[in-house]
Amino acid sequence: MLAGRVQAEESTSAQSNSVATENDSVTLEAHHHYQSAADRANDALLITEVKRALADDGVAEDSPIIVDCDHGTILLSGVMKSAEDAKRAGNIAASAAGVVAVKNQLTWH
């Protein structure tokens, strides 16, 4: 290997998440393409930060929610108690440091 030459190793990550409550369930399958382990770690950190913020607020209590991240874009998927709760969860996710955008696919009943 030549000095000073760095090769980025592209990796593909596929994951499937499921969560359920007594009345509702949510499943999400995602495929991510990362250029580095640091990109993957950054997304994992953002997922943790958003989950923590949602838990601290209590908006997601007793609601099946999946939080995913792809290159800084948070995806919220699940079932909330109300439209207001779904919107609030999206706003909480958007306010987390490092989040670039939020795709809020939360539904309610």
Image: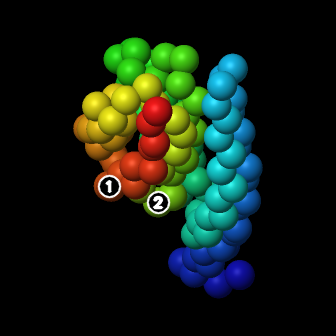
Label 2: state its secondary structure. Answer: loop
Task: Residue at 65%, 84% (x, y): give it.
Answer: 2
The x, y position of residue 84, in whole percent, is: 28, 31
Image quadrant where residue 100 sits: bottom left
**Percent position of residue 7, x then y:** 62, 78
Q: Which amino acid does label 2 sit on?
A: His
Q: Observer-nearest residue: 5 or 19?
A: 19
Give the number of the disc on residue 56.
none
For the question of whether residue 96 can be seen, the reply is no
Q: Name the residue under label 2.
A: 71
- Binning the other alpha carbons within 10 Å of mark 1 as few (below 14), some (14 to 19) or many (20 upward) gives some
Say which residue appears at 71% left-offset and 39% top-offset.
18
Question: Which amino acid lies under the numbered mark 1 shown in the image of this protein?
Answer: Val
Q: Name the residue under label 1.
A: 100
The CA span between labels 2 and 1 is 8 Å
Query: Nearest the camera: 66 or 108?
Result: 108
